[in-house]
Image (cartoon, rainbow, N blue to C red):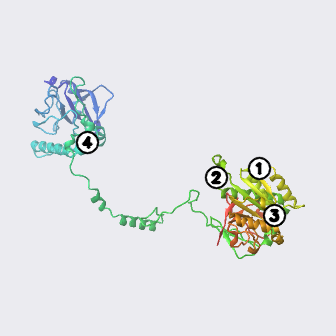
């Protein structure tokens, strides 16, 4: 009777257009040749409607997935399913429920194990088989083989991922009691038992040996040479190292000689970026400062700018933020300033004032004179408003070593300064103190330089200094570019973002 099948879970294949439906049989209408399913699933996705009705002529294949009353004995009892249609439902000729035309004896599938639904092409191939018995046997063999081969794969994928790969795959409803009986492990999530894991492991080394890396890279390099594309790297190519502030985009060729002087001297320098900075004679340097002063860069401005740059360099040499911070207030650095009564000395006094403003203990030595230059007098007045100490004799200088000695004793215009007693005494004290010496604007002739310096600071453009000048630095004192052009110098600033840069002998 047709009522026997009410409550059974079936799978109905309606072809590629309508797809596959699964659900529980709710009614069978013999008169109208229809069958209705409740809680239907369409291609593995739950339908929005609670019930779906099918006509017999739309059904291409019908499978019975679960029969009420046989669920408890599904693991031990074989059920004979007749492949004739459900009573009251006549399928089209040539099409049967399980793809066969006779009684098939097979075990009842688990309610939670996924089953494969044959495609339309499989049904057509089964129709043209030599006999129904052979067709049924080959189909069952294929079913068992597919189940065995897919165990390892289904262990890692649930029914949802499987249904996404096979549109016609069934997603049966899970069965089990919530109360009274303990639910078994969900095979849809966890797959088969752990005892059935395949023993053979994937041979990574063997598969890696099949890959000829050198040949592949050679083929890529050959293709890129022919097509003109740029290679991203080869096994034998060393990657380029770039600084964090370096531009890696290709641009116009760099011109390293951006400063051209009318008369070449015997010495040239270069910056950290490779820019060439030629040295100039003292006469050209003096002319450059005179033209700049005529255009408004007065001696006072030049002295102040030199003092700022020299103090910045001195603070760096003293240790910078590692030395000058509130935690080290108990060990303030000590700097001895040795200055003469000239413009170079005024630059040193300005440097000492800025250092004193930055909490550096400054001891300023300058000899007593009845009359001094106005720039020296003005700088001394400002220095005396700081915490710095001014002395006029070498005896008042400290006997213990200081952190830094800044020398501004020499003068380009007056070489007789070197014969003065105070000059010789200051040079002797500096040699005896053994502190590192920073010389500001030292003389070009080594014979005129009384103290060997570890660092020398030049103004605007460097002079051809000797070995006694130590390492040469260059500071920007604010000379405009057109002032350089006026004295015949093609000039482009080599300073970049700094006011003091190191120079290297070429």
Q: Earlier in the sequence, mark 3 or mark 1?
A: 3
Q: Quadrant of residue 160?
A: top left
Q: Which mark is residue 340?
A: 3
- Identify the element where label 4 is drawn: loop
Q: Which image quadrant for residue 415?
A: bottom right
Give how far apart the Cα atoms at labels 2 and 3 are.
29 Å
Category of crowding for the residue at label 4, using alpha-carbon neighbours closer than 10 angstroms: few (below 14), some (14–19), many (at least 20): some
Which element carries disc 3, helix, strand or loop? Answer: loop
Q: Which quarter of the image is occupied by the N terminus?
A: top left
Instruction: Give the answer, above or below, for where 136 lies relative to 458.
Output: above
Label 4 to label 2: alpha-carbon separation: 65 Å
Q: Which mark is residue 323?
A: 2
Q: CA distance from mark 4 to mark 1?
A: 82 Å
Residue hosting label 1? 387
Which tag is nearer the camera, tag 4 or tag 2?
A: 2
Looking at the image, residue 434 sits to the left or right of residue 292; the answer is left
Q: Secondary structure at mark 2?
A: loop
User: Residue at 80% of width from left, 53% of height from top?
Assistant: 383
Of mark 2 and mark 3, the one earlier in the sequence is 2
Q: Position of residue 266 (x, y in %)?
A: 71, 76
| Picture quadrant of residue 284 | bottom right
Residue visible at 77% across and 65% down in the picture: 426
For discs 4 and 1, the disc positioned in front in the rendered view: 1
Q: Which residue is mark 4?
A: 155
Alpha carbon separation for disc pair 1 and 2? 19 Å
Q: Earlier in the sequence, mark 3 or mark 4?
A: 4
């Amino acid at each position: 009777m047709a009522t026997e099948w009410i409550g059974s879970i079936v799978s109905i294949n309606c072809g590629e257009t309508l797809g596959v439906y699964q659900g529980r049989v709710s009614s069978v209408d013999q008169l109208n040749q229809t069958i209705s399913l409740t809680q239907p699933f369409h291609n593995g996705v739950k339908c929005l409607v609670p019930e779906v009705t099918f006509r017999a002529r739309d059904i291409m294949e019908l499978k019975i997935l679960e029969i009420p009353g046989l669920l408890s004995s599904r693991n031990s009892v074989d059920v004979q399913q007749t492949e004739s249609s459900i009573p009251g439902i006549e399928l089209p000729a040539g099409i049967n429920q399980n793809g066969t035309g006779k009684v098939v004896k097979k075990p009842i599938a688990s309610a939670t194990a996924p089953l494969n639904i044959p495609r339309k092409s499989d049904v057509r191939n089964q129709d043209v088989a030599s006999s129904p018995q052979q067709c049924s046997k080959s189909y069952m063999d294929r079913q068992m083989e597919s189940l065995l081969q897919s165990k390892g794969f289904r262990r890692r994928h649930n029914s949802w991922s499987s249904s996404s790969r096979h549109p016609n795959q069934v997603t049966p409803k899970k069965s089990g009691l919530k109360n009274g009986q303990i639910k078994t492990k969900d095979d849809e999530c966890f797959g088969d038992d752990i005892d059935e894991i395949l023993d053979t492991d994937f041979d990574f080394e063997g598969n890696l040996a099949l890959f000829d890396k050198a040949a592949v890279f050679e083929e890529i390099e050959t293709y890129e040479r022919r097509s003109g594309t740029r290679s991203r790297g080869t096994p034998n190519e060393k990657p380029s190292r770039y600084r964090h502030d370096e531009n890696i985009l290709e641009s116009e060729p760099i011109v390293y000689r951006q400063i051209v002087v009318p008369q070449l001297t015997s010495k040239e320098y270069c910056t950290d970026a490779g820019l060439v900075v030629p040295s100039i004679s003292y006469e050209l340097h003096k002319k450059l400062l005179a033209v700049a002063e005529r255009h408004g860069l007065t001696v006072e401005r030049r002295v102040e700018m030199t003092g700022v740059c020299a103090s910045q360099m001195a603070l760096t040499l003293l240790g910078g933020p590692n030395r000058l911070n509130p935690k080290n207030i108990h060990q303030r650095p000590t700097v001895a300033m040795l200055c003469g009564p000239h413009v170079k000395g005024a630059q040193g006094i300005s440097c000492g004032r800025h250092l004193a403003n930055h909490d550096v203990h400054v001891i300023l030595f300058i000899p007593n004179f009845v009359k001094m230059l106005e720039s020296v007098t003005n700088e001394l007045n400002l220095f005396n408003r700081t915490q710095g100490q001014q002395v006029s004799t070498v005896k008042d200088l400290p006997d213990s070593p200081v952190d830094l000695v800044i020398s501004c004793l020499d003068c380009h215009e007056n070489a007789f300064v070197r014969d003065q007693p105070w000059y010789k005494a200051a040079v002797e004290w500096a040699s005896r103190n053994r502190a590192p010496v920073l010389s500001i604007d030292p003389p070009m002739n080594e014979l005129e330089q009384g103290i060997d310096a570890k660092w020398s600071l030049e103004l605007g453009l460097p002079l051809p200094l000797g070995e006694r000048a130590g390492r040469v630095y260059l500071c920007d004192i604010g000379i405009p570019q057109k002032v350089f052009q006026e004295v015949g110098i093609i000039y482009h600033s080599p300073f970049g973002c700094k006011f003091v840069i190191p120079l290297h002998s070429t």
